């Protein structure tokens, strides 16, 4: 097998391992403090230790796993302070994104309306995973609409899909009520009103802050 094909296969497996560990962490199958032994995980998922090691590095970058010399890796507890800080940063980033994206998205928000409809559908079903997926897509579209790669990279690095799902799971939210803000945000972007879009995004995100 050519080296590039091997690399692609390894990267794909590392992503699969990461997603499986992430699922178990999110669902409480791997509670905080659980040791993550590379060899055991590799055996359980029928893979080598290389992809497991890469997956653990990515989860560590997401602040979900801690790796210590001579102690190995274990699941990190995500505290209310962690979530609060993440949402403070997110609110600031998205306020800026709304201001920058509005001129670019003016009169072209069909994709956002489609995603908002999927969010509403998931909210009515009380489907937290589905709500999270479409909500992340919706907000990422706005970030992408800024055409600012540094803003997008920073936003991506904060792993909001994980934080959103954790916040929804820990809090008592009416998802149908929570999603209503998306339609006002869309209207502001459609009309090219950056300051209003930014303010609405900041208020919407701040409403989820612990």
Image (cartoon, rainbow, N blue to C red):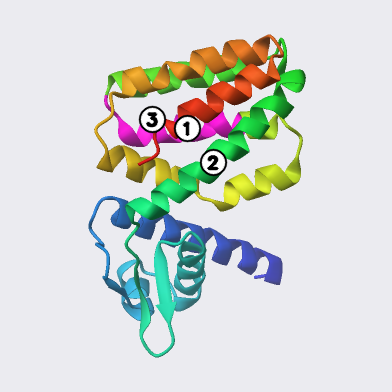
Callout 2: helix, strand or loop?
A: helix
Near-viewer residue (64 or 49): 64
Q: Which secondary structure class fits the magenta region best?
A: helix
Q: Which label is found at residue 152?
A: none
Q: Distance between the residues labelled 3 and 2?
A: 18 Å
- Of the two numbered discs 3 and 2 on the same chain, state the one appearing first in sequence: 2
Q: Quadrant of residue 167?
A: top left
Q: Are marks 2 and 1 in contact (CB under 8 Å)?
A: yes
Q: Name the residue under label 1.
A: 205
Q: Distance between the residues labelled 3 and 1?
A: 15 Å
Quadrant holding the C terminus: top left
Instruction: Tally the marks.
Output: 3
Q: Mark 3 points at which residue?
A: 131
Q: Mark 2 points at which residue?
A: 90
Please check the rendered image and state whether residue 138 is part of the magenta-colored stretch, yes or no: yes
Q: Do the residues labelled 3 and 1 touch (CB within 8 Å)?
A: no
Residue 27 in view in this figure: yes
Q: Position of residue 22 (x, y in %)?
A: 38, 55
Q: Give the range drawn in magenta.
A: 126-141
Left or right placement of residue 193 versus residue 70 in this view = right
Mark 2, residues whose alpha carbon is within 10 Å: few (<14), some, or many (≥20)?
many
Q: Where is residue 141 in the image (x, y as percent from the top left)?
A: 62, 30
Q: How far apart are marks 2 and 1 (CA)?
A: 7 Å
Q: In this view, does 144 lie above or below 52?
A: above
Q: Quadrant of residue 90?
A: top right
Mark 3, residues whose alpha carbon is within 10 Å: few (<14), some, or many (≥20)?
many
Residue 23 in view in this figure: no
Q: Is residue 181 above or below residue 13?
A: above
Near-viewer residue (68 or 210): 210
- Of the two numbered discs 2 and 1 on the same chain, state the one appearing first in sequence: 2
Near-viewer residue (56 or 82): 82
Q: Where is residue 86 in the image (x, y as percent from the top left)?
A: 48, 48
């Amino acid at each position: 097998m050519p080296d590039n094909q091997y690399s692609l296969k390894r990267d794909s497996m590392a992503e699969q391992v990461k997603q499986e560990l992430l699922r178990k962490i999110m669902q409480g199958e791997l509670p905080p403090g659980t040791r993550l032994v590379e060899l055991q995980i590799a055996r359980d998922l029928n893979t080598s230790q290389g992809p497991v090691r890469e997956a653990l590095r990515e989860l560590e970058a997401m602040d979900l796993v801690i790796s210590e010399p001579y102690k190995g890796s274990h699941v990190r507890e995500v505290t209310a302070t962690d979530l609060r800080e993440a949402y403070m940063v997110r609110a600031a980033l998205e306020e800026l994104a709304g201001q920058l994206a509005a001129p670019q998205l003016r009169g072209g928000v069909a994709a956002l309306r489609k995603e908002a409809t999927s969010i509403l559908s998931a909210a009515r079903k009380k489907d937290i995973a589905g709500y999270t997926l479409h909500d992340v897509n919706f907000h990422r579209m706005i970030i992408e609409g800024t055409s600012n790669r540094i803003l997008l990279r920073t936003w991506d690095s904060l792993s909001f899909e994980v934080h959103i799902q954790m916040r929804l799971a820990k809090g008592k939210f009416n998802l149908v009520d929570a999603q209503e803000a998306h339609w006002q945000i869309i209207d502001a972007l459609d009309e090219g009103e950056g300051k209003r879009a930014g303010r609405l995004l900041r208020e919407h995100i701040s409403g989820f802050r612990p």
